[in-house]
């Protein structure tokens, strides 16, 4: 059936998928798994089941919705925000569960980009279930942008954040670097930390600055959601380092290779990494084209002299500059937050 004919034959598809998207949004934003929602509609048009995925290790959205629907799902339609999975992971395959529940039609939004899990549409069709995919697909992908990116690239999305003065200095001539940016920028960084799977620095930053790398509010109270703190590099982390404090978990990866670091974080279910390292770590990721987004906090200060935010990138002529697209500009007190993205993202 063509897309137009599909819409004519099933005028309620978009409405039900939209409702499934609203359910999906109840899931956790930071999780190894995507947020997924499902609505089951009986043959008479009544909604008989609703479900959403509450995070890795819990039941998938379809299973929750089918459980509520029971026998009423027979001959009905399941609307899902993601192609039902075909794999047995932490839970059983949803495509099978839909066949067993005897639904006659499945409408989904985003095709599953996860190589392990995809193929559910084929399983359903092979069992005689009518399948329509791609309804509100972009909206569904936008619900899980970092998970979608990570599944497509088999690595987490990398946001590199730095603070600098208006003239691009991250430390003064005497090495002092605390309070480059203002209080609103610092609060914004803490919000960002609570929204990523992991924050990453090199051992050099741990030794030089002894950061905590936790997400805290203005009064220093730890946020309910803490990122995994990752320290990369071969040097030892001193026993008393604040990054080893108990507020959040910490992982030391004794390597300087950005690709190896991202591979191990991806395997651990991390979908977005906030790179907070110093100039060396930042340069290592930029040089290997492993930075997807740059967030610059530009402070209302001038130093005239001092360390730059990023180390040498191997660029000696303007044609070789790393090019970015400006995505967002925001004023934070006297500071400005600039968000740039690599053209691919
Ligand atoms: C669905 N419905 O609600 C979700 C799906 O480790 P598991 O078993 O939980 O599987 C995770 C993968 O399953 C995940 O990467 C994605 O491809 C799919 N998630 N699929 O049919 C759901 N959460
Ligand atoms: Zn599933």
Image (cartoon, helix red, strand yellow):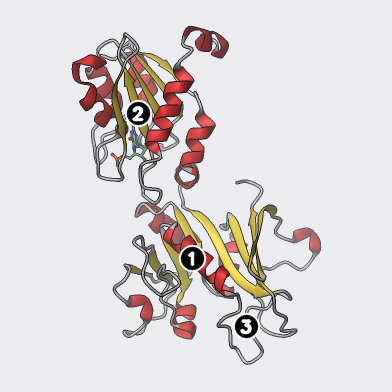
Which structural element holds mark 1? loop
Name the residue that disc number 2 marks: 38
Kindly report the distance in space between the C-alpha atoms of the residues bearing marks 3 and 1.
25 Å
Name the residue that disc number 1 marks: 257
Sequence-first disc among 3 and 1: 3
Residue beneath the point at 49% across and 41% down: 152
The circle drawn on residue 36 is none
Sequence-first disc among 3 and 2: 2
The verdict on label 2 being within 8 Å of ligand 1 is yes
Kindly report the distance in space between the C-alpha atoms of the residues bearing marks 3 and 2.
51 Å
The percent coordinates of residue 148 (x first, y second) are 47, 42
Residue 66's quadrant in the figure? top left
Name the residue that disc number 3 marks: 171
Asked if the residues shown at circle 3 and circle 1 are in contact, with their CB atoms under 8 angstroms apart, the answer is no
The percent coordinates of residue 216 (x first, y second) are 41, 69
Kindly report the distance in space between the C-alpha atoms of the residues bearing marks 1 and 2.
40 Å
Asked if the residues shown at circle 1 and circle 2 are in contact, with their CB atoms under 8 angstroms apart, the answer is no
């Amino acid at each position: 059936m063509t897309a137009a004919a599909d819409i004519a034959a099933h005028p309620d598809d978009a409405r039900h998928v939209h409702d499934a998207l609203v359910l999906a949004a109840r899931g956790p934003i930071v999780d190894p798994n995507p947020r997924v929602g499902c609505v089951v509609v009986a043959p008479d048009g009544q909604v008989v089941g609703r479900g959403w995925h509450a995070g890795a290790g819990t039941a998938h959205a379809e299973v929750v919705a089918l459980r509520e629907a029971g026998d009423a799902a027979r001959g009905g339609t399941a609307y899902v925000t993601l192609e039902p999975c075909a794999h047995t992971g932490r839970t059983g395959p949803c495509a099978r569960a839909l066949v067993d529940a005897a639904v006659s039609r499945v409408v989904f939004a985003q095709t599953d980009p996860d190589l392990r899990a995809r193929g559910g549409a084929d399983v359903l069709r092979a069992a005689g279930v009518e399948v329509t995919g791609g309804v509100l697909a972009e909206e569904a992908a936008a619900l899980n942008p970092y998970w979608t990116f990570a599944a497509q690239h088999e690595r987490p999305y990398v946001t590199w954040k730095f603070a600098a003065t208006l003239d691009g200095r991250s430390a003064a001539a005497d090495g002092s670097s605390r309070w480059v940016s203002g209080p609103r920028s610092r609060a914004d960084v803490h919000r960002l930390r609570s929204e990523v799977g992991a924050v990453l620095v090199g051992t050099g930053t741990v030794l030089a600055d002894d950061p905590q790398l936790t997400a805290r509010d203005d009064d220093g109270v730890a946020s309910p959601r803490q990122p995994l703190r990752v320290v990369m590099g071969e040097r030892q982390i001193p026993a008393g380092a604040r990054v080893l404090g108990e507020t959040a978990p910490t992982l030391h990866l004794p390597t300087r290779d950005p690709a190896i670091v991202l591979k191990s974080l991806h395997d651990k279910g991390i979908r977005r990494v906030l790179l907070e390292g110093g100039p060396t770590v930042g340069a290592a990721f930029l040089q290997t084209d492993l930075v997807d987004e740059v967030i610059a906090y530009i402070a209302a200060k001038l130093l005239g002299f001092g360390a730059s935010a990023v180390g040498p990138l191997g660029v000696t002529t303007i044609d070789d500059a790393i090019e970015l697209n400006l995505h967002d500009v925001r004023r934070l007190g006297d500071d400005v937050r600039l968000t740039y993205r690599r053209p691919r993202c």
